Image: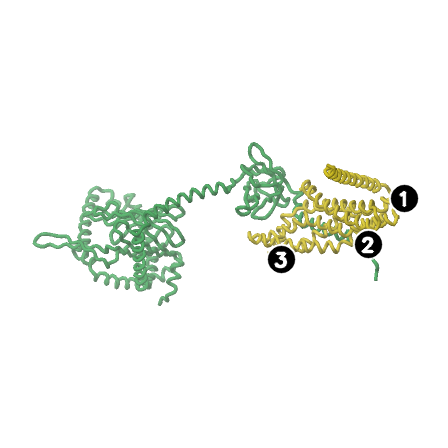
Chain colours: A green, B yellow
Amino acid sequence: MVSISTQAKVGLFVLAALILLAYMSFRVGQYGFGLKNGYLISAEFENATGLERDASVRIAGVEVGRVENITLTDGKARVSMRILPSVKLADDVKVMVRAYGILGDKFIEIIPGTKGRPTLEEGGEITRVEKQIDIDQLVRNLTNIADDVLAVTASLRKVLGGEEGAANLEGILTNTRELTANLNRVVKENDEDLKTMMTHLAQASKDLEKTFIALRQISEEINRGEGTMGQLVKKREIYDNLNETLASLREITDKINAGKGTIGRLINDEKTVDALDTSLASLDKSMEGLNKYLLKTEEFRTFLSYRGEYLFDSQNSKGYFEVKIRPKEDKFYIVGLVADPRGKRSISERTVDGVTSHIEEWDKNKLLFNAEIGKRFRNLVLRGGLLESTGGIGLDYFALNDNLRLSFEAFDFDPDRRPHLKVFADYELLKHVSMTAGYDNFISDEGNESPFVGVSIFFEDDDFKYLIGNTPIPK
Amino acid sequence: MKRALLFFDNLGSSVMRTVEEAGSVLLMFIDVLKWMVKPPLKLDLIIKQMEFVGVKSLFVVVLTGTFTGMVMALQGYYGFRMFNAESMVGSTVALGITRELGPVLTAIMVTARAGSAMAAELGTMRVTEQIDAYYVMSANPVKYLIVPRIVAAVLMLPLLTIVADFVGILGGYFVGVPILHINAGAFMKNIVTIVSLDDIYNGLIKSAFFGLILSVAGCYKGFTMTGGAEGVGKATTEAVVLASVSILVCDYFLTAIMF
């Protein structure tokens, strides 16, 4: 056995200990080595509370330097930072003081600037300093928000609290359940028809677009006074004639509405629906050809929505089921069913012994229809068509990233009474759920005005497709 | 009356004894400093003491260091678990070991092993008149007996502390990561970010002071002992107690100055 001398033992021990020291120093001080050659930059902060020397400087969470010094200049905290020489900062970087979590230590975050800009050199200064949100401020803001929320909930409690409110809510829920069940049935029964109808509508919209272009050309021509139409528009007598024509047209439509004449009967007759059904079916077939011709169905999107509204004054609820077809970003069609608890109104006129009497009837089992066409101009949407089975127009204004919709609707222009006006705001609470509140029929002279609240559930394109995709569609 | 006077008598004499002792320690220390710089330096004697103080204490230091680190990890874990901050165990162990426990425990262990041996050796030499023999040979016993011990202790204590630091953190790691299932990356990251070089170096500076304290106490008690074989035992005990207490008291003041 080789005996180890005392000197060797001591030497070995010293060496081993020094190696360990070097290792630990390297691990712990690892960072300090590269940083020594780093360059100094500085920034002025309004408030550097919690920031200490040697706090880290990070870009995207990666440490690129340390705080070297913090001094007070002109009532602001001037923080100088030593940055790794390998890290180049553009001169438009932004800095902010941040914390690891709510209670964590503070560090400086650098948000990278534009590539290609001149870089900061030794002694450079970052001028774009983002304001730091401190916890106090946050808490103050939150308190304000909480107060607001409290006020809202308090008023909500006034509306919904108590036995009456609970009963009302229960009523809404029961109604909604019934309605959804009905809707479910309707959708199931008409599933196939709806699908084909929508496809065809999409095709039709394509055609409509072309028509619109043509129409615009024509209208331009008219404006210029070219062609027959142009001449017509320019002449006064023709204008008068047109006015008369419109007046007589008005008479005719009134008659139709009242169920007079062939067309009137046609519209108000049950048979018409059947006839329409069959004609729609044949329309389906004829459109099949078009379908193949214009096979770009993917572009358009469809939305399915159901909205339940509770009218406070009449203590009734109303349900809307709508299919919105949006072939283009700024254009859409809405086809929908409306379940009004009052039902569908029909007026019949009877003449007995020379005395004409109007009889107004409400058929509670009948659904009302919505069929609208709409166009969007930036945040404003203009739509018109059939609203609750009567002619009408609507105006929507979108705000808050389209989450909030302010709407105005006017329909049921009956000469005997004031039109049905409705304003409401719709706010998208969740991805598929939104809340509605508004005032219905507010200029009514029949005492139908009522504030209302409602909830709607809507599905977008993909969801809808997924739902339909579960049921096989025969080709 | 007489009793009261006796009390003051006792008090006064014990104070005087303490001050006298402190004075003679200081005188001896000055003597050591003088002989330390006076050539020739007895390198072989120093190395022999370094082996005794350093190399031979290694095992006991490694053992204490490891188990201290392990128990710190275990205790720290129970505390930090309440805040879901288990990964902080690593930095706590590392910080505690490098700043405090490494230097102090090493110094206490070396006191127990080498400090006591110094007192016993020198005491025995005093009893057997070997120290007087140095004077007879006109050789200074301080230079031959005390200087090498003190130099060796001052040099070896920091080195032992390094080892204690390392094995302590290692012990903490082995309890923390494989046994308590703390995330290894977070464990190490916290050590690296929270422990700074200053923590380690200040610990080492402290341990050098501790080396000085324990060797001076051991040498002084042994060198100045009286009273035969019984006195040797008494000197040894006193050396260990004096050194241990002084180390802990000085530790506070050194920490207060350095951190």
Near-viewer residue (A227 or A172): A172
Disc 1 marks a residue whose amino acid type is: Tyr
**Dot 3 or dot 1, earlier in sequence:** 1
Disc 2 marks a residue whose amino acid type is: Ala
What residue does disc 3 label? B177
Q: Is residue A362 visible?
A: yes
Disc 3 marks a residue whose amino acid type is: Val
Q: Image quadrant for the N terminus of chain A? A: bottom right
In the orientation shown, which residue stands out farthest toward the front?
Answer: B1
Is A446 on the left or on the right of B162, as rendered?
A: left
Residue A350 location (% of width, % of height):
12, 55
Residue A297 location (% of width, % of height):
38, 59
What residue does disc 2 label? A8
Q: Secondary structure at mark 1?
A: helix
* Pointer 2 local density, CA inside 10 Å: few below 14, some 14–19, many at least 20: few
Is A445 on the left or on the right of A299, as rendered?
A: left
Residue A98 location (% of width, % of height):
54, 44
* Pointer 3 local density, CA inside 10 Å: few below 14, some 14–19, many at least 20: some
Residue A207 location (% of width, % of height):
33, 55
Which chain is home to disc 3? Answer: B
Near-viewer residue (B118 or B158): B118
Q: Is residue A209 visible?
A: no
Q: Image quadrant for the C terminus of chain A? A: bottom left
Is A300 on the left or on the right of A228, as rendered?
A: right
Near-viewer residue (A193 or A424): A424
